[in-house]
Amino acid sequence: MASASLLVYPAGTPEVPGRISQPHFALPAVLAAAEPDPLKAALDAVWHALHTHGEHYPELLKEIWAVCSGRAHK
């Protein structure tokens, strides 16, 4: 049985009842990151990661933004 910390509610999809398993939802993000086109890989990986975070996706976006803006200033 999965622990409660590994289950989240889908964000923006009220028609999907219940919680989702983050480990299972994370797999497409890992596979997307292996795409040969770097831009497509990055965008698809972030897209799938946002879905993996469910209702907590704003926190992930803030973290991604912090990392990207920190590198832009170097």
Image: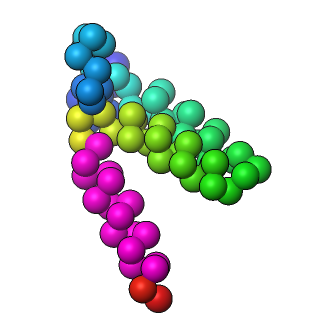
Residue 3 in view, yes or no:
no
The majority secondary structure of the magenta stretch comes to helix
The answer to whether residue 11 is above or below residue 74 is above
Report the magenta residues as a range. 57-72
Q: Quadrant for residue 19, please give it.
A: top left
Q: Residue at x 25, y 48 (%)?
A: 58
Q: Residue at x 48, y 37 (%)?
A: 48
Residue 2 in view, yes or no:
yes
**Residue 74: x %, y % from top left:** 47, 88
Q: Quadrant of the N terminus?
A: top left
Residue 55 lies in the magenta stretch: no
Q: Quadrant for residue 31, please give it.
A: top right
Q: Quadrant for residue 14, please give it.
A: top left
**Residue 12: x %, y % from top left:** 26, 27
**Residue 20: x %, y % from top left:** 34, 22
Residue 59 lies in the magenta stretch: yes
